[in-house]
Image (cartoon, rainbow, N blue to C red):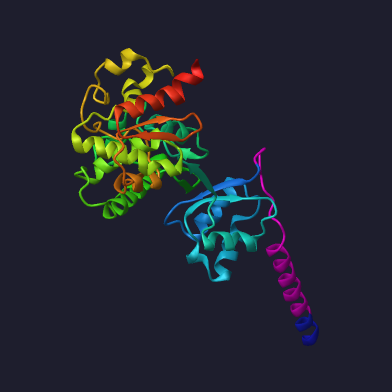
Amino acid sequence: MAFRWTLLAAVAVLAGATAIAAWLHRPLSLRLQGQPAVDVVIEPGMSAAEVADALVASGVDTSAWGLFLWFRLSGQSRALKAGSYEIAPGTTPTTLLDKLVRGEQAVRRLTLVEGWNVRQVLQAVRAAEHLIDDLPAGDDPVALARHLGLRVAHAEGRFFPDTYVYPKRTPASRVLRQAAAAMDTRLADAWARRQPGLPLRTPDEALILASIVEKETGLEADRAHVAAVFINRLRIGMRLQTDPAVIYGLGERFDGDLRRRDLVTDTPYNTYTRAGLPPTPIAMPGWNSLLAAVQPASSRALYFVARGDGSSAFSQTLDEHNRAVRRYQLQPRQ
């Protein structure tokens, strides 16, 4: 009789172990409600029991007690990481635990493009998937800088153009602070590489010049030469006369056609009416433009004009420049 009970107990234990093993490797049922995956947020400080409850409440259709017991028996109940997760079809209790222990959060990407201004940055941020918009209404660079706690009063040009990866439900301000920190790092790096004797007093002035270079040319081979033109003009006190700065100063009034009256209407960004650099950057410069601003080409050119193929023709004198304008801009129109 004792042997029979022992045998029955062994069979029961074996059956239970088999059932548990099968459950651990069987895909969990999910209440998807038309979504491709179940979204769940694990808050910092949650206990294993609270994590199990959150999973079930979010749409993992199983026993919260069973999940909690699995977390405890695995010995990893204290290793579950907070974050935003996606539980996709096919996820088993085993792979679920692995995901939570490794902290494999559901992430998205935001790309900020060289040459964008604050308005375009905010448009991209507000259109980004699963970013929480905690930013000030509108697109005022001053209000944005204040909200983000930047070291400067104006947010224009202060974000480094790159692709940023973020967990779902991340506040937009966190991503922009990351982009601002990246720009601070890159700007400091570029400034440390600057040529001696530049007419640039601070890293911020280098950033302003780099933003102009970014808007004036997209051709890599021309960046350092464009920067040299502006550096040469700054050295002799000649006005920069750069159209992108004028356009930036017009803001939403610019309709795509820069007119002569725009060039003579004074604004803080009109480099035809005012000497020196504009008060802030006019866009986000990339690394190559940052480097061009502090390492301009060895050139005496004071002028450049677009050739029409993406490149520019550079001239030392006004007569040379006027001939280049007639060759590359006036003749094709005629």
* Quarter occupied by residue 63: bottom right
**Whole-percent x and y of residue 208?**
29, 38
In the drawing, does residue 154 fall left or right of residue 159? Answer: left
Q: In this view, does 61 lie above or below 328?
A: below
Q: Does the magenta stretch include residue 272?
A: no
**Is residue 34 at least partly visible in the picture?**
yes
Residue at 67% over, 48% down = 30
- The one nearer the camera, 205 or 62, is 205
Q: In this view, does 72 lie above or below 309?
A: below
In the drawing, does residue 155 fall left or right of residue 31? Answer: left
Quarter holding the N terminus is bottom right
**Whole-percent x and y of residue 54?**
53, 50
Residue at 33% over, 46% down = 297
Q: Magenta residues: mostly which secondary structure?
A: helix
Residue at 45% over, 43% down = 220
**Whole-percent x and y of residue 183?**
34, 47
- The one nearer the camera, 132 or 316, is 316
Q: Which residue lies furthest to the top in this view?
A: 261
Residue at 32% over, 16% down = 262
Residue stretch rendered in magenta on the structure: 8-35
Q: Is residue 15 magenta?
A: yes
**Whole-percent x and y of residue 73?**
58, 70
* Quarter occupied by residue 156: top left
Numbered label tally: 0
Q: In this view, does 306 lie above or below 334?
A: below
**Is residue 244 at least partly visible in the picture?**
no
In the drawing, does residue 71 fall left or right of residue 255? Answer: right
